[in-house]
Image (tube, rainbow, N blue to C red):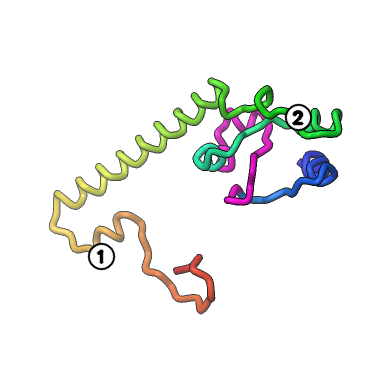
Amino acid sequence: YTTVCQSVRELGGAVMEMVCKRVQLVICTHKAAQQATQRVRKAVKQNKPLVSVEWIQACRDQNERVDLEPYRLDRRPMVQEALQKYQRHRNEAKNKSDNRIKTDVDTETKTQDDVKDLAGWTEPVALGCCCVCHE
């Protein structure tokens, strides 16, 4: 990780910890792509190119920005399958959770507060912070 970050900086690029609007592409290992890590999923969701570590090595070797296409991981079938598997797993978990809450609510008369307790929601806590992260 540190070697890749160093290479990016030496070639004039910037390293961001999170995938955001300013990110142009995401460099990751084949393993991270196959495991559909959070950054990989976010990059794909935001239509950011996902390239292998070998791309930055090729840029360094040729001392210029090389074509991304041969190094794109987001277009490989194994990565697409991993993302689809993750999405299926997530949907199944959501359906199970929805069914459990619906069953619990249907079997007894519940108030909104009771449903919140079943879902694991908590009341918001004012932290006196200026940002919206905690609201």
The residue type indicated by label 2 comes to: Val
Determine which residue is flagged by label 2. Answer: 66
Please give left or right for residue 40 compared with residue 66 in the image: left
Is the Cβ of the residue at disc 1 closer than 8 Å to that at disc 2?
no
Left-right relation of 130 to 55: left
Report the residue at 37% width, 39% height from top: 93
Task: Residue 7 in the image: state x and y as whole percent.
Answer: 82, 40
Q: Looking at the rendering, in which quadrant would you find the C terminus?
A: bottom left
- Bounds of the magenta segment: 19-41
Count of numbered circles on the image: 2
Identify which residue is drawn at 78% across, 44% down. Answer: 5
Residue displayed at 64% across by 40% down: 25
Q: Is residue 125 magenta?
A: no
- Quarter residue 116 falls in: bottom left
What x and y, as percent, mark residue 65? 77, 34
- What residue is pinned by disc 1? 113
